[in-house]
Amino acid sequence: MVHRKSSNVISGKSMTEITKDLREQVREQLLGREMTTTITKGITITPSEVRKFFSRIPPDSLPFYSSDVEVAQIVKVAKVSEVQKDPGSQETLRSASTAGGRS
């Protein structure tokens, strides 16, 4: 049996206080979205206008960001069965696959 602590023990707040805090955060986010929509309502911009704007900024005024890259790979090595290792059966498998699986 797993005993779980109630949220008021973990955060030190009652559910009412947590709800009030979250409600305020959501209200601020919605207000921010509404203001952004109001400000940008009638504005249209083309990709060429964006390129023109950024091309006017001197290169030495742009911040430098290092190009750190992280690469990961998941590799699964297939197991080769004894039938696949046998040269005679390889020809049988090849002809079966070219014939659409019909022997």
Image (cartoon, rainbow, N blue to C red):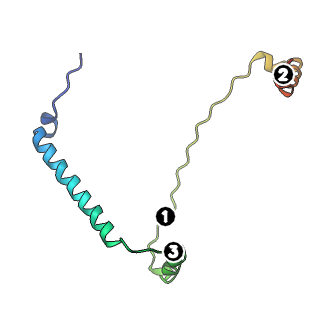
Q: Residue at x 86, y 25 (%)?
A: 99
Secondary structure at numbered mark 1: loop
Foreground: 47 or 62?
Answer: 47
When asked about the image quadrant of residue 88, the answer is: top right
Which mark, residue 97? none
Instruction: List the residue tagged with mark 3.
Output: 46
Residue, disc 2: 93
Point out the frontmost of discs 3 and 1.
3
Total numbered circles:
3
Which corner quadrant of the image does residue 40 belong to? Answer: bottom left
Q: What residue did someone put label 1 on?
A: 66
Residue 30: x and y in percent read 25, 58
Can you say whether 91 is above or below 66 in the image? above
Q: Are marks 1 and 2 in contact (CB under 8 Å)?
A: no
Q: Earlier in the sequence, mark 1 or mark 2?
A: 1
Residue at x-position 12% and y-position 36%: 8
Q: Nearer the viewer, mark 3 or mark 2?
A: 3
User: Which structural element holds mark 2?
Assistant: helix
Name the amino acid, label 1. Ser
Quadrant where the image shows the C terminus: top right
Q: Earlier in the sequence, mark 3 or mark 1?
A: 3
Q: In which quadrant is the N terminus drawn?
A: top left
Could you tell me how far apart the alpha carbons at marks 3 and 1 are, in whole angstroms? 29 Å
Residue found 55% across the figure and 48% down from its top = 71
Give above or below for 9 relative to 21: above
The earlier-in-sequence mark between 3 and 2 is 3
Marks 3 and 2, how far apart at CA: 57 Å
Q: Is residue 13 visible?
A: no
